[in-house]
Structure formats: structure tokens, C-alpha cells
């Protein structure tokens, strides 16, 4: 990460949500304080447990209501960084599984 000149760790408040195909929130996490470290993978595997559903129920919800055409939208709102940010902005990332 030679191009990454920021601190090794930042702490942010974030709110994560799964969106349906038409943009409605299917499941949303409460605002939580998260610490992110360079070169560390972020794992959202426990996301399903926060909605009181088993893994099978959560998979059924995903397949029938959220990703019927193979498109999964995961939104993460972030703010209150522990470091100074030079500008505000909007960022979108996409992947295909």
C-alpha cells in the first residue's frame, strides 16, 4: 500500500444495510463504532445474526427478496472519522458474485 499515506488505523461510525432490488432497506444495522486497519479484510458474516434469523432463513430472504436477479446491494454509511478528511464525498463500490 505504498500509495496509502493515512494513519495505520481509523475509527468511524457506520451504519450498514442490505437493499432490495428497488432500493428499499431489507435489513439495517444500528450505528456502530468500527476500527479499520490497513491491509485488514472486513467481514460482515455476522450481519444475519443481528436480525434474529438463522443462516438458512437469511439465505432464503436474500434469494427471494433481495437478490432475485443476482444483484446484491450492500450500503454502508460512514461518518465521524477519527482523522481529518480534506473533503466530503460520495463513494460507490460494486462487485459481482
Image: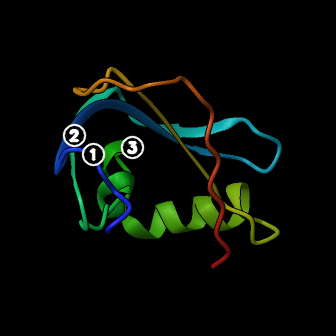
Distance from label 3 to label 2 (Cα)? 27 Å
Give the residue number, with chain letter if any, for mark 2. Answer: 10
From the image, state whether disc 2 or disc 1 is nearer to you.
Answer: 1
Q: Residue at x 78, y 66 (%)?
A: 68
From the image, state whether disc 3 or disc 2 is nearer to you.
Answer: 2
The answer to whether marks 2 and 1 mark residues whose Cβ atoms lie closer than 8 Å is yes
From the image, state whether disc 1 or disc 3 is nearer to you.
Answer: 1
Task: In the rendered view, tell whether residue 10 sits above or below residue 71.
Answer: above
- Residue 80, image x, y percentages: 32, 20
- Residue 75, image x, y percentages: 56, 43
The foreground one among 35 and 39 is 39
Give the residue number, with chain letter if any, for mark 3. Answer: 51
Give the residue number, with chain letter if any, for mark 1. Answer: 6
- Residue 6, image x, y percentages: 27, 45
**N-terminal label among 3 and 2:** 2
Looking at the rendered image, the quarter that the N terminus falls into is: bottom left
Amino acid at each position: 500500500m505504498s500509495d496509502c499515506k493515512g494513519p495505520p488505523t481509523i475509527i468511524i461510525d457506520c451504519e450498514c444495510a442490505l437493499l432490495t432490488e428497488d432500493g428499499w432497506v431489507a435489513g439495517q444495522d444500528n450505528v456502530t463504532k468500527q476500527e479499520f486497519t490497513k491491509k485488514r479484510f472486513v467481514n460482515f458474516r455476522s450481519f444475519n445474526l443481528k436480525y434474529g434469523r438463522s443462516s438458512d432463513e437469511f439465505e432464503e430472504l436474500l434469494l427471494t427478496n433481495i437478490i432475485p436477479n443476482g444483484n446484491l446491494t450492500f450500503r454502508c454509511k460512514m461518518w465521524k472519522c477519527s482523522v481529518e478528511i480534506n473533503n466530503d464525498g460520495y463513494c460507490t463500490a460494486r462487485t459481482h458474485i
